[in-house]
Image: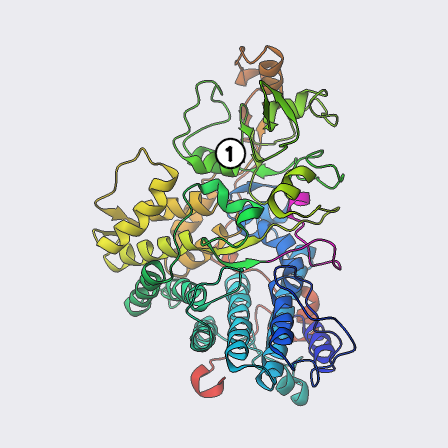
Amino acid sequence: MKSKYIKYTAVTLLLGLGLSSCSSFLDKPVEDSYNTENYYTSDAACISGVNYLYNSPWYDFQRGFIKVGEVLSGNMYWGNSPYLNFSVNGTDQDLVNISYSLWAEIGHANTVYESIKGATASEATKNQCLGECLAWKAMAYFFLVRSFGDVPIIHNNSENLAAGDYNTLSKVQKADVYEYIIMTLEKAMELLPKEKSTTGRIDYYCAEGLLAKVYLTRAGVSGSLNSSDLTKAAEYSKDVIENSGRALLTNYSDIFRGSNNNSDESLFAWKWTVGSHWTCQNTLQSDLAPEGFDENGDCWGGWGGPSLDLIEAFGVSPKDDPAKRIDKDSRRKATVMLAGDIYDYFWRDHDLGNNKKGFDYLRFWYDKTYNAAATGECQAPCGGTNVKHLYGDNADHIAETGLTPGRMAYAFSTHILRLADVYLVNAEAHTLLDGGSTTNADALYAFNQVHQRAVPSDVEKSSLTFDEVWKERRLELAGEGDRWYDFVRRSYYDVNSCIKEITAQKRNSLWGCNIVYKRYYESGKTNWSYSEEDGEFQYDEATAAPNVTAASFSLPFPTEDVALNPNLATSAASIHVDVRNTYSY
């Protein structure tokens, strides 16, 4: 925990130094010199105060969670990143930012929650806003405990400030932290409306979906699977599937377009905007898109990208002739750009000929008449480029949101819990309850709904194994920052399988892609040929697999945090807390 950061955050909030919202997804009242005593005097003020929890405190975590969720897990290649080779230490800036961001979200959620309890607003709005505070607090703790393992519990900022114990707090055992998250979500569900939100706000079923995932995760924390937790994961996820009023979007790629920021598919999402102060905006395109992808000169992600291991998991390869490649799974193109791909939702103001407009992957690299910034070299180190989290160019962003993006600033939501995830929670819970395979009707329905949206040519499954759900989660959620946390969950009770899978991955670069792609493009897309002996499509076998151990599945606390509070050291003992008797809402 960033102790002095929490102290600073809590103090500034308690003194009323700004609880304004910078989100554009809901209106906010005019800003003035408010403090916590005179600010929360209306429904609009309560909603405005909560809006902040949907964006700014998460900004630094947003920049880092791809490296944790995707690079650590082997879904993404990122050069010499310590997240690729498992050498992350306590001084890593992304790690520091991740920690700061999560504790800031918890500090803000606590303060807004305590302030709204005394608000002179309608009971319905107060309850809604209180529930949202708790739901976001639970989400922040869910990321914390899965990232760092045992962590302190900050239940009430005022109490810790009064006690002056913020530099002596002990880590709490993971099982107890999960119990605290569950208790927090239960209270959130008491307060949140069951009516489906259409504005991107968290409602009852959003919190219940998270609760189902928390139970699935906690089920193995003791070292063996707890059938009671698995049963609750199945029950809660089933309730969301059947009663939330939500349905999966028909077209998978539509989930990630700005016009669907608030779709049925999105249960928890960071809500970003442009034109307000820094940290209110989405910046992921800058980190993930290749140079020249937009007009703002702010893209530098071309030298990283989806790993060869992930690409091949979709059943295709960069080595495939684009004219003959068979893409059974629609999620591949919505996740990874490969040679031959054309997108109608990117670069919709660029001519392709034949009265068509859009983004041509190969022309982007090699045709200066199409892309003035074309360098003549494909940057993709494994043959493919990211798709998710990208908005395209200015015309694309305006078409989707009605807003003009800025440098490192756009307004596409970042979905961090989707409805399809909850479907797969149900399927996984049942396979584990039934010993590794199941014919349970709920599990089959949930799995088939997700899988057949992506691969409609596949027949419905009449039985289902854990390994099938495990792979399905990877393909469904690839690029969304979640895969590492799947490994963390599984490592609680089956760490050797996690180590074996990660060390067997193709995590290294694929040399010579540019030579093959350029020759193919310049031949008029007729000459698809390569020679691995000449270094074309040659996989880097020289770089060794990472050294993964049981200890690899939790990240170290930032070094500065440990210096301020030695109780956070890896060697420091964690304490057991009777959560239900110690804390209450």
Write the residue at 59% across / 10% down: 523
Write the residue at 45% across / 67% down: 207
Q: Nearer the viewer, residue 34 or 567?
A: 34
Q: Which residues are magenta?
A: 271-287
Residue 535, placed above or below residue 422: above
Q: Secondary structure at mark 1?
A: helix
Residue 277 within the magenta-colored segment of the rendering: yes
Report the amino acid beneath label 1: Leu
Q: Nearer the viewer, residue 566 or 29?
A: 29
Residue 28 within the magenta-colored segment of the rendering: no
Q: Nearer the viewer, residue 180 or 251?
A: 251
Residue 143, placed above or below residue 513: below
Write the residue at 62% across / 32% down: 348
Q: Residue 156 location, x and y as percent?
A: 59, 82
Relative placement, left or right, of 304 versus 17 is left
The secondary structure that dominates the magenta segment is: loop
For disc 1, the marked residue is 308
Relative placement, left or right, of 283 versus 482 is right
Residue 127, placed above or below residue 462: below
Q: Is residue 484 visible?
A: yes
Q: Residue 48 location, x and y as percent?
A: 64, 70
